[in-house]
Amino acid sequence: MLKINGLSKYFQSGEVLTKAIDGISMSVGSGEFVAITGASGAGKSTLLNVLGLLENFNEGSYEINGTEVSKMGDRQKAQVRNENIGFIFQSFNLLPYLSVYENIELPLKIRGINKSERKKSVEQLLEKFGLANRAKHLPSQLSGGQQQRVSIARALSCAPKLILADEPTGNLNSEMANEVFSMFEEINREGTTILVVTHDEGLASRAHKTIQIGDGKVMQVS
Amino acid sequence: MKAETEISLAIKSFGFQWQKYMFIAAVMSLGIAVFLVVSNLYINLTSAFEQPHLHQLYKPVLNDWKKDEAFDELDSSKLPPLMSYQNSMALAQIEPGQNASSFKTEVIYYPSQAQSLSLLPLSTRVSSISFFEIFNLHFKFGGKDELTQKSGAWVVLSNQTNERLFAGANSVGKKLNLNGHYFEVAAVLEEKTHLFREHDVVNGAFEGSEDIYLPWQAADVLNPVIRGKKLCKDGKYASRYLDVKEGSCLWVNHWVKLADSELHAYEQEVSSYAQQLSATGMLTGETPYQIYRAKDWYEKSGVINNDSKIFPLLAIAFMFVCAVNACVILYAQAIEQKPDAANWYAFGLSRRSILSVFLIQSGICSLFIVALTFVFSLVGISVFKGIFPAYETSLYLGLDSFFIMVVISISFMLFFSLFPGISLSRVKPVVYLKQGGVA
Ligand SMILES: Nc1ncnc2c1ncn2[C@@H]1O[C@H](COP(=O)(O)OP(=O)(O)O)[C@@H](O)[C@H]1O
Ligand SMILES: [Mg+2]
């Protein structure tokens, strides 16, 4: 599903050149559940952002579903993000002025799905994540755990093949973090590929594969 | 990417930020409203030149005063051309067309015992009967027949004066006591229906109109106060009509109505009259006489003076300042919207669509600008009419103003949104998604 080869990403700030990713090669197959671990500043987020087409890279190659990313234009990338990738962020990043329902509906709207089909999908997700009675609430009226459930539902709304989650449990207590990982396991069983960045070794061990990153390089795969 | 999605996103996010957009709308519409009202006024004023009856009006001017004669206490270097009573009467003899002579003064109205009024000073224009025809003034009551019947003892009331003295009733035939003499009302003028006013030509811009009109014969009887040039004739103080009637410093307004074919002959007559005067040493200067077209006289007498020409420019400048302000707020608005845009971007909105959403938001804002501009302009116009009642019927927001309003609002907003919109669409999503915490 994803294939990267010698991928590098630099940040130039003033005189200092940071190699956030330094020649990483790896591939992630369809249906895998991969945890990415590593110290702070190791390059985990940068890797995920590049994989999610939110950021360009400097060297190497990146193929997603057989298409070379560096050859895609902005619109094509937008389409890939919309149709194939679901993002989950540490700080949820829900739109504050949209209700729970509307937040989950957003990717479907962007995709151009018609209203009745959107309704069907969103209601299913609300049901699945126990948010049915919160549909009209604004994100600010929800707890952190509930907000993260909304953001997972949003990530799933377009039925993407790939979920990218950057420390999704970082702002949650351990009980809620467990719950989120249980959801990931369930989503993964239904066939969705998951890449999740986490600090928590216990949680990471629930993935099929753990990739440890250090200084922008792959240190260990287990 | 469906336009429908962009529109619905734009509406949502507009609703979230409506306060800022309303502020932009208020600032922008204020600028446009000021521009609209001022330009409307200006166009109104200038279009008054185009009235057909003005094309045949001419003003002969004789520069018959001498520099060593004391004249005006204020600015002796820029003295106005002068037409004495004598010269005016002499020119009236040679004119082939109609002519109108007049001067402005003031008489006191003595109310009858039945009227609960005190002594009332009335601004008065002493004039010939043809004055009303030449300046295309229409009558509400009475008319030319009554004026000729009463020959030297008529009085014409402005509509306003008729309201004041006779509560708007038909007062033709009623007698008025002016300075202790009785005059019979021969006619009442209609309300002015357009901006051009005869007194703009004879008095200059924005001076009030006359309360009443009296015949020349009445001036001999009433001997009214002369306005303005008090020092006259060998430095002697002259304050009343009869003191200066025979002299050279009674400033008479003299107009003549000529067909094109009559103009040449008339010029020659005036020229030979001026030569006669020059020969006796009465006229000085290289051009002892001039003949102005009404339009030129308008310019010269400052009906559209340089001040009023500056107003449209000031209005444009003001509108520009407002636009700059709106632009700055829009830019701040775009910066604040970056976390949202980053979010949209992550879920599949292309950069172009982000720009579209921002432009649509501005489009919505421009609808509010149109509405507010409409309100502000109406308020502005009614305030202006309150101050200058003469504009009552001539100043209004026409369909063309409305059209201009819509075009300016929308094009301004789209133009000024382009730069902030592009900057928004170039958002670095990662920066804002990492900060997160939008909720
Ligand atoms: N926008 C940026 N500009 C400059 N340096 C950056 C930027 N983003 C990340 N970095 C640097 O890249 C390195 C990797 O960062 P990141 O991927 O966020 O690490 P992690 O998520 O593993 O903590 C760090 O040294 C960080 O300082
Ligand atoms: Mg990180």
Image (spheres, coloured by chain):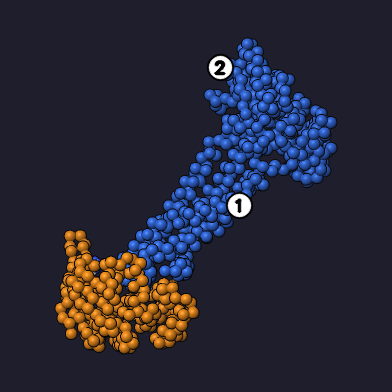
Chain colours: A orange, B blue
Which of these two is toward me, A104 or B87? A104
For ligand 1, tell me if the residue under mark 1 lies within 8 Å.
no
Horizontal placement of B415 versus B211: left or right?
A: left
Q: Hey, which residue is sitting farthest top in the picture?
A: B279
Q: Hey, which residue is sitting farthest front in the picture?
A: A66
Above or below, A17 relative to B177: below
Horizontal placement of A42 versus B229: left or right?
A: left
Q: CA distance from mark 2 to mark 1?
A: 51 Å
Q: Position of residue B31 (x, y in %)?
A: 50, 51
Above or below, B196 relative to B285: below
**Which badge, 2 or 1, comes first in the chain's sequence?**
2
Which of these two is toward me, B210 or A141? A141
Q: Say few, some or many: other residues with alpha carbon within 10 Å of mark 2 (under 14 / 14 to 19 / 20 or more).
A: few
- The answer to whether residue B304 shows anywhere in this view is yes
Residue with the mark numbered 2: B286
Residue at (70%, 20%) from the top-left corner? B91
Q: Chain of mark 2?
A: B
Q: Say few, some or many: other residues with alpha carbon within 10 Å of mark 1 (under 14 / 14 to 19 / 20 or more).
A: few
Q: Hey, which residue is sitting farthest left in the picture?
A: A219
- The answer to whether residue B16 shows anywhere in this view is no
Please identify, in this view, whether the residue under mark 2 or under mark 1 is nearer the observer.
Answer: 1
Which of these two is toward me, B342 or B302? B342
What element does badge 2 sit on?
loop
Residue at (60%, 18%) from the top-left corner? B288
Horizontal placement of B434 versus B43: left or right?
A: left
Q: Position of residue B84 (x, y in %)?
A: 67, 22
Residue at (56%, 27%) from the top-left corner? B74
Residue at (35%, 79%) from the top-left corner? A160
